[in-house]
Image (spheres, grey):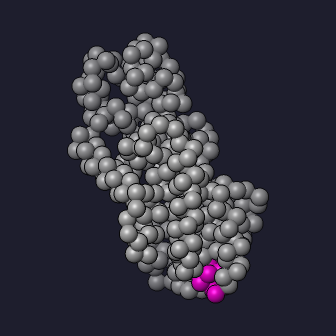
Amino acid sequence: MSLKADLTSTDLAEIRQSALGAADPLGIAAELAAAVDAGRLSDPDDAGPALVLAAEIAESRSKLDAGLRYVDRALETYGKSDDGPAAAARALRARLLFRAGREDEALAEIEPLRPLLTQDTEAPAYISVALAVGGRARLAEEWLTEAVQEVLAEREGPEPTSAEDAGLLFFLLQQRHRIRHALGRQHDTHDVLAERLETKLANANAQAAAAGSSDDLLFWPQAEFETLVTRFPALTEVYGADWDEHRARLERELVRRSGPDVVLVPGTVAGLEAAGDPSDAKTRADYVSASTDHISWPPERNSPCWCGSGNKYKKCCLPRSRG
């Protein structure tokens, strides 16, 4: 498999899906590194993700030295960044060190990431996986338990009744529950809450798929949104009081429904008015059903955000799902 010139974020995502089934995945890993060296990436910010992918391919073939070389190069591209991709790369490095029997180094790599458990929805997964790979599932349980307790202590109001309401807490509970299941632990109150939220999420996803709620995935670009709420103020109850709230609602709904066929339908006020009374839910549903204009979701972290702001997804709407 020969990689094309000028690799995009989409290309990297496709390679991730196909590389492990390729005849020569290690060759693909080497080509990814060569593409970084030759400046064959459409977006230079994709150098880190490309090298991380190369490291993961090497790990899958137990080529730990090669994996460490690739991930070390990835970390060099991230520099002093401490955002999600850089932290996930450090967790990958810890995982490789664990597999190589270098436990002290692995623990030294993963320990500084511990505070992210209460800050980043992705951290509970990559930190707990790294510790489990290193035979430290009990330590993962301890860290996750303390993080759950910290978030609960800071949380105001009643116990969450949905994954969306729980936010970061849901991801902590979910990973803790899986680790404890692997350890054969008896259920405690946190495990019960995790199962209850997972069940509610599964049921909500099934209901949403069956009902196909139109308003939930109808997106108003900024200028259209301002026109809409000026002319039909009551629709702020449906779409949000301002454009930031509108985008945050959509991002959370997209995360809740996440799947290969989830798309947004961009709306125009003129188009909606032509369909009938905008205040009528059926009019809005018919408008969405008739639309042939869709926005795919999710974009790559370093790709332009789906909302059209011009900012990268990781700096724009991705964090809104954690609010």
Give percent across and percent down for residue 135: 54, 80
Choose between 243 and 303: the one closer to the eye: 243
Left or right relative to 155: residue 113: right
Choose between 22 and 218: the one closer to the eye: 218
The residue under the point 27% across, 34% down is: 289
Above or below for 234 versus 9:
above
Give percent across and percent down for residue 290: 27, 33
Residue 305 in sight? no
Number of numbered discs present? Answer: 0
Residue 97 included in the magenta stretch of the image: yes
Above or below for 174 versus 249:
below
Left or right relative to 130: residue 105: right
The quarter of the picture where residue 74 lies is: bottom right
Residue 212 included in the magenta stretch of the image: no
The residue under the point 59% across, 84% down is: 99
Left or right relative to 182: residue 150: right
Residue 155 in sight? yes
Give percent across and percent down for residue 13: 50, 62
The quarter of the picture where residue 317 lies is: top right
| Residue range of the region highlighted in magenta in the rendering | 96-101
Above or below for 121 versus 306:
below
Give percent across and percent down for residue 200: 31, 49
The residue under the point 27% across, 24% down is: 281
Residue found farthest to the top: 231
Choose between 289 and 136: the one closer to the eye: 136
